Amino acid sequence: MRIIQLLPNLNEGGVERGAVDSNREYAKRGHESIVISNGGRLCEQIVKDGGEHIAFDVASKNILTAPWRVYRLKQLLKELNSDVIHARSRVPAWLVYLANKKLNIPFVTTVHGFNSVNAYSKVMTYGDRVICSSRFLIEHIKEHYGVADDIIRLIPRGIDLEYFDPNGLDIPWRDSFVERYNLSGKKIIVQVARITGWKDQLTTIKAFFAAKEKHPSLVLLLVGSVDKSRESYYGELASVIEGSKWRDDVIFTGNQSSIKEIFSLATLNISSSTKPETFGRANVEGMVMGVPLLASSIGAAFDYVQEGKTGFFFNPGDYKELSKLIEKSIEYRFDHAYIRNFAQTNFSLKQMVDKTIEVYKEVV
C-alpha cells in the first residue's frame, strides 16, 4: 500500500513519535510511506527510516489561506495517488476532508487529543474509520459527536519494545547522568511531561516535599521542555522549590532523548495531569521498563493503571493523597516483571501497526 500520514509538525510530542514509529514500521513491511507536515527536527528521521517527507503547510489555522492550501493539497494528493490518507490532527484533517471530496481516497483519522467540543474538532470524526487510543476517547466522541460504533477502532499507541529493552541500555550515558545530578544511592521519582499547567508538576512537587520528610533519599526528576508560552508557570514552580529546604533534590532535566535510561533508574513514575490524558505515552513507557505509575484518576490512565499491580490512583490536584501514595509505594512490593509483561502485551508498537494496517485494509 501507499500510505500518507498528515500532521502539523514533526517536533516533540506523542503524536509526532507515533507518526515516526509508524513510518518506520510501514517501510519495514514493504509499504510506501509518505509523511506530510510543515516540517521539524524529525523530518530527517522519516527519510532515514525509509519513508518520504513532503513539506506542506498543514499547520496554519489562517482561514484566509485555507482555500489556496486546499487546492494545492488536492493537486498533491492526485499526484501521489495513495491508497489511504491518515490525518492525525485537526488542521490537516480539515484540509484533507475538503481536498478529498471529489478524489474519494479512503480516509482515516486518529483522535489523539481531548479537544474542545465544537464544529472545528468534529472533523476528527469524519474519517471512514476513526481510531482512538483509549476507551476514554471512544466514550468522548460517542457522547459529543454521536459517532457510530461500527466506524470506531480502539488502537492503543504503541511502544517500541526493541528500543525500550532493559538489556539494551546506554550504560555510559546513564552513569554520566547519575554523576551529573548526584543520583547515586537515591530513590528516584520521575515525571516525564512538558512543563505546563495542566500536567500539574506543582502537585507533584508539593507531594514530593511532604514525602521527603520521612524519606530523605528521595529525588524528583522533572523531565520535559519549558515552552516559551509557559515560562510564567515554570517561574511559579521555581519559586516554590527555592523556598524549600529540599530545593536541591528537585531537578529539571529539560527534554531528554534517553528516556529508557532515565526510567531504568526510577523507583516511581508520576502523572499528575488535571485534564484527562488521551493516552499518556510516557506513562506506559515507564511501565514497559517495569516502573509503577501513580496517576491522577482521570482519562486514559484507567486503561493501564491496575490498583496495587501496576500502580495507584489519586484525585487530581490532591498533593496530600499523592504524598501518602509515594510513601506507600516506596515500601510496596510491586511485581516489576508483571508490570513489564502487562505493558508489553497490551501496548506494543507491533500491536498498534498490525491493527492500523487492518484498518487501512478495511477502507481500501
Image (spheres, helix red, strand yellow):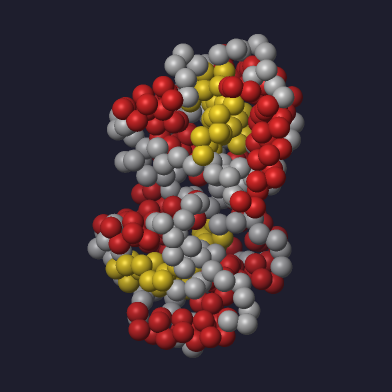
- How many numbered discs? 0
Q: Position of residue 118 (x, y in %)?
A: 71, 68
Q: Quadrant of the C terminus?
A: bottom left
Q: Residue at x 63, y 23 (%)?
A: 247
Q: Is residue 79 left or right of residue 363?
A: left
Residue 305 falls in which quadrant of the image?
top right
Q: Residue at x 28, y 58 (%)?
A: 48
Q: Residue at x 48, y 52 (%)?
A: 12
Q: Position of residue 340 (x, y in %)?
A: 42, 31
Q: Is residue 53 visible?
A: yes
Q: Nearer the viewer, residue 72 or 173?
A: 173
Q: Position of residue 16 (x, y in %)?
A: 46, 56
Instruction: Relative to 332, say whether 364 is above or below.
Output: below
Instruction: Relative to 47, say whether 257 is above or below.
Output: above
Q: Is residue 182 left or right of residue 166?
A: right
Instruction: Relative to 210, say whether 264 is above or below.
Output: below
Q: Is residue 277 left or right of residue 167?
A: right
Q: Residue at x 53, y 53 (%)?
A: 133
Q: Quadrant of the N terminus?
A: bottom left
Residue 170 falls in which quadrant of the image?
top left
Residue 271 falls in which quadrant of the image?
top right
Q: Is residue 276 visible?
A: no
Q: Nearer the viewer, residue 284 or 67?
A: 67
Q: Position of residue 291 (x, y in %)?
A: 48, 28
Instruction: Relative to 94, say whether 349 is above or below.
Output: above
Q: Nearer the viewer, residue 32 or 209?
A: 209
Q: Nearer the viewer, residue 144 or 99?
A: 99
